[in-house]
Amino acid sequence: MCPLLFSAVLVACFCVLVAACVVQRRPNRRQNPVFFLTGPPKTGKSYLLKMLSTRLKWVGITTPEISADGERLAIGLKDHLGNDGILAARRHADDRFNHGTTFGSWVVYPSELERISGTAFVPAKDTQVMLIDELGKMELFSRSFVDRVDAILACPIVPVIVTVPCSEVPAEISAIIARTCAVGNGRRIFLNADRSNFAEVLEMLYHACK
């Protein structure tokens, strides 16, 4: 293909993508915000999203904890359509039973994340918010999931709330955020969520998205 023609095709494709983002953006919203909820585990980030999911029309993924006798055995996956799966489970002492990607004391299942996320991020006309719970090191094992998150953050057609399970954002996740912020639209807002400000953050996010 002629280099000039190839360049013209690339420019045309880019314009189509930008136009699609503008057309699909929520009415009366010049910029849709992306909220990053950061903080250590067990500070209520996932529960906060669970509460929001009962008050707003949402799409996306949540990660319910699967426990027994107070011990965390697995991290689940669930979308707004009711599809569910397992993101990670405690590593078995016998590696013959570990059929995923080993990550410390956990075994991660990227294929499950890819299966659930394949349809989880498609907003309907009445969608008020997209929930991504969570964006951590385990999720980074799935290239397709990272690519989907990149696309969402670059052009948020509804408000997006992302939980990040750490008090400081890891370098790998910072790179994703920086890359998408550099080319994206909308505001990026970081909130450090913990039990002391749970009610305030919940109400702020609710009113920002409704």
Image (tube, rainbow, N blue to C red):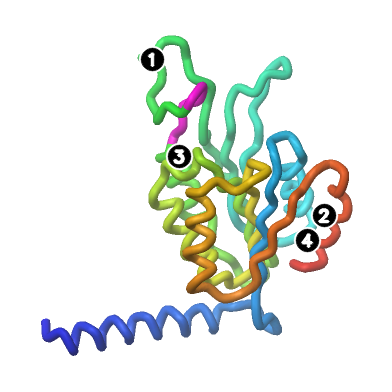
> Looking at numbered disc 2 in the image, what kind of residue is underneath it?
Leu
**Where the C terminus falls, by quadrant?**
bottom right
Q: Residues within 10 Å of mark 2 (few under 14, many from 20)?
A: some
Q: Position of residue 186 (x, y in %)?
A: 62, 74
**For the view shown, which residue lies furthest in the left direction?**
1
Q: What is the span of residues highlighted in magenta in the rendered image? A: 104-109
Nearer-N-terminus badge (3/4): 3
Residue 84 location (% of width, % of height): 55, 40
Does 5 sit above or below residue 117? Answer: below
Q: CA distance from mark 2 to mark 1?
A: 42 Å
For disc 1, the marked residue is: 95
Q: According to the image, label 4 marks what residue?
A: 205
Answer few, some or many: residues within 10 Å of disc 1's Cα (few below 14, many 20 plus, some between 14 and 19). few
Q: Position of residue 38 (x, y in %)?
A: 68, 48
Cα–Cα span, label 3 and label 2: 29 Å
- Horizontal side of 16 relative to 202 (left or right) equals left
Q: Identify the mark at residue 202; answer none if there is no mark.
A: 2
Examine the image and state in which quarter residue 101 appears: top left
Residue for point 49% across, 19% down:
91
Q: Residues within 10 Å of mark 3 (few under 14, many from 20)?
A: some
Question: Which residue is painted at 78% across and 61% down in the image?
Answer: 205
Per the image, the residue denoted by label 3 is 112
